[in-house]
Amino acid sequence: MRAALVAILSGLCIGKLQAQADNNTLPHLVTQDGHHALIVDGAPFLMLGAQCHNSSAWPATLPKVWPAIDFLHANTLEIPVYWEQFEPEPGRFDTSVVDTIIKQAREHNARLVLLWFATWKNGSSHYLPPWMKSQPDKYPRIIGKDGRRVDSPSPHAPATLAADIRAFSALMRHLKAKDTQHTVIMVQVQNEPGSWNTVRDFSPEAEKLFTSPVPAELLKVMGTNAPAGGGNWPEVFGTNADEYFHAWHVARYIGQVAAAGKSEYPLPMYVNASLRDPLTPGPASKYESGGATDNVLWIWKVAAPAIDVLAPDIYQNDSAHYLKVLELYSRPDNALFVPETGGTSGQARMCFAALGHGAIGWSPFGLDYTKYASQPLGAPRLTEESLGQVALNYRILGPIMREVARLNFEGKLQAVAEEKDELRQTLDFGNWQAVISYGVARNGSPKGNSEPVGRALIAKIGENEFLVTGAFCRVDFKAAAGGQRDFLRVEEGGYEKGAWRPLYIWNGDETDWGLDFSSAPQVLRVLLGTY
Ligand code: DGJ
């Protein structure tokens, strides 16, 4: 009976939603009309990610990583490659750990984003191999304004740059040879680069550069905002000179590492940023200076063209801050990718807010079972219960991730997360408005969920037809031209190789008050009319 219904209903489907996969295509980013997609196996791919803890990328700890990834149904694991492990002696590269990670990822049907922990890790240089750390004059840290060394690598250190380029190139060369099936889909170059506790390097070399002319490329993008004839950093940038100078040189350095790696094997590459407060930033002394904070994205874009994406690590908990960051990093010249964020129940819904800004991926930090707890930043000590809301996201989105990525790329998708005290949200689709309400009883008015956990995703797939999913919310529609909304047909189903496969029809209680989503992963295809 069900098979017959499926056969009849599938005849009503509007063609395939997805191009045939092509395993030979190298992962790459595409942009069209200001929308972005990460192409994996020849089609848009949505990274439903999880990042393990910093010290979890060892054969001894991986058995505590994979059970969490499997439980979550994450399709992508973000995992470090440590320079200290990869190059134990100058010029000798140990690929054994990265090979183990790739092998196990395949066994767990997961893709990888490799995090190159090298010159910078959270603004310091703690992942330099010991043979480098023991030569601090050759591989120097920066000097603060008071003349003391600061625990942050100098971006003006040719020997460190040359060593990083050599090691990163070896890694990318190895991936090219080893990973012909593209298990690794993207690479993070360094980790939260920049400097804490000083706005820039004040060493003699840095001082010389600071009073040299601002590079012509930078003046060019400034257009008429640049002083005629240019000038040195203080002359051109005044009070911002210290910070902009540092951002330029950190970005320039990392851009060279990325470009060298890409010349071996051109996977998509990104840099993650420790953020400044997006609403009330304050001076650079209050955040990590030199990284890709929102005020210097334009500098990074010019200084490091080999970096495809500047990606925010979002640990802000309130939605005003979170949403502002999403807005700042989703730009026609920058695909939104959230490579780190909190993994708590309260933050899980923000995955949908990110999708609403066109995200190509979203990935909470610290989701493994090693029992390390990084509160208040990342996830608390994990249990299947605390992972539940992120797992729910991935149970909803996993089966439709190709369609979500494609519809976002085509600019047809909108998605939202519940905000405290905002009981109803409206999304404008032209001839239809989608109305999402939270904490609503059958025919009552919305009261909001006791905690804001609601989320909804809606894509317009035909003139009067929508793909709808969500959790802890009600979705309904209003016709812009007036008239009462009529559900002509509401199918629950899923996609198989890009073709919609309906399972059954919703009607009666399931549609009389609107479309109610709870904690069950349900995807609907909704045909609307009016009367
Ligand atoms: C942000 C960093 O990028 C991560 O590697 C990690 O250190 C987290 N902060 C917090 O634990």
Image (spheres, helix red, strand yellow):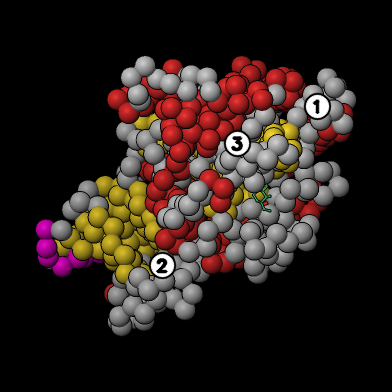
Task: Give how far apart the Cα atoms at labels 3 and 1 are.
Answer: 18 Å
In this rendering, the answer to whether 19 lies above or below 517 is above
Task: Give how far apart the Cα atoms at labels 1 and 2 are.
Answer: 51 Å
| x and y percentages locating residue 278 in the rendered image | 45, 52
Give the mark, 1 or 2, whose residue is nearer the N terminus. 1
**Magenta stretch bounds:** 481-487
- Type of the residue with mark 2: Glu
Looking at the image, which residue is at 68% across and 54% down?
Answer: 366
What's the mark number on residue 200? Answer: 3
Q: Does the magenta stretch include residue 84?
A: no
| x and y percentages locating residue 193 in the rendered image | 62, 38
- Type of the residue with mark 3: Arg
* Residue for badge 1: 137
Of circles 1 and 2, the one toward us is: 1
The quarter of the picture where residue 204 lies is top right
Residue toward you, 160 or 451? 160
Quadrant holding the C terminus: bottom left
